[in-house]
Image: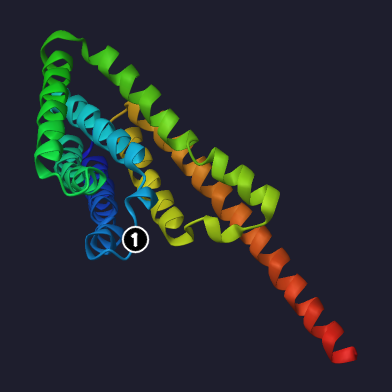
Amino acid sequence: MSEEDDLLKNIFGWVGTAISTFFYITPIVPFSKLIKGEMTVKEVPGILLICTFMNCILWANYGLLKDRFLQYFPNGLGGAITLIYITIFLIHLAGQRINFALLYNFFLIIAIVGLSLLFYFVIDVEITGKVVLIFNVLMFAAPGEKMYTVCRTGSYELIPIWSTIGGLACSGCWFMYGVYVSDIYVIIPNALGILCSIVQVVVYLIFRGKKKNKIEKEGDTQENI
């Protein structure tokens, strides 16, 4: 790899790291509302938190196995941040019974650490890459149900457009990083992430345009009456 290619790889990696870190921090807004009692624990996607935590740990392991700082650092940081959110979630889920939440997190950490050690010391790096690939594909496929609801109801507001655009930029950066390091396990899931983000943006614009046209027509009709 030439010096120019190495520079571009690092640029895409660091930009991807910055965007990823931002995404890991953004749940602080709903969680601050949860702490203040402005929203209920039922409104917090607990399963998504666990999936995000698992995803971070697997990617951090893969980055360690490949000795890639730009992969294991942001995912390790993301895992630590997500664990804090999981703790807050469980405290509220248990009705402020902190002991239950701490106990749950203790066993969760033991399980994740055990899984991490298994992947790092026992399982081959290629198998780890395949597991990470499958897990990421499932994560990116998750918004499919939301897209179906938007297409059925026309409620384009269900799509968090700025988060989607940020996700598109993030997937784009990691896709280019994967190209420069020639790693198919990084390229494929992020290519899918780009595709999914583009589909969400297109669906958002289509249904937003339809609603806007409908409002304009209703306004014209009222003026003519």
Q: Amino acid at mark 1?
A: Met
Q: Is residue 153 left or right of residue 107?
A: right
The total of numbered circles placed on residues is 1
Picture quadrant where residue 181 is located: top left
Instruction: Locate the C terminus and report the quarter of the image it occupies.
Output: bottom right
In the image, residue 42 lies at what x, y percent?
Answer: 37, 48
Q: What residue is pinned by disc 1?
A: 39
Q: Height in image: 131 above or below 190? A: above
Q: How is the image coloured?
A: rainbow
Q: 80 or 178: which is nearer to us?
A: 80
Side of 87 where 24 appears, left or right: right
Element at badge 1?
A: loop
> Is 115 above or below relative to 88?
above
- 135 left or right of 58 in image: right
Residue drawn at (15%, 39%), measured in percent from left and top?
101
Task: For residue 184, say whether it is visible.
Answer: no
**What is the crowding at mark 1: few (fewer than 14 residues within 10 Å), some, or many (at least 20)?**
some
Quarter of the picture holding the N terminus: top left
* Residue occupying the point 17% across, 41% down: 83
Residue closest to the eye, 31 or 57: 31
Q: Residue 104, position in %: x, y?
A: 16, 32
Asked where in the image residue 162 lies, by quadrant, the reply is bottom left
Quadrant of residue 90 in the image? top left
Residue 80 coordinates in the image, percent (x, y): 14, 42
Q: Position of residue 115 (x, y in %)?
A: 17, 19
User: Relative to 117, is 63 above or below?
Assistant: below
Q: Is 207 in front, or is 35?
A: 35
Residue positioned 76% across, 71% down in the render: 214
- For the question of whether residue 190 can be seen, the reply is yes
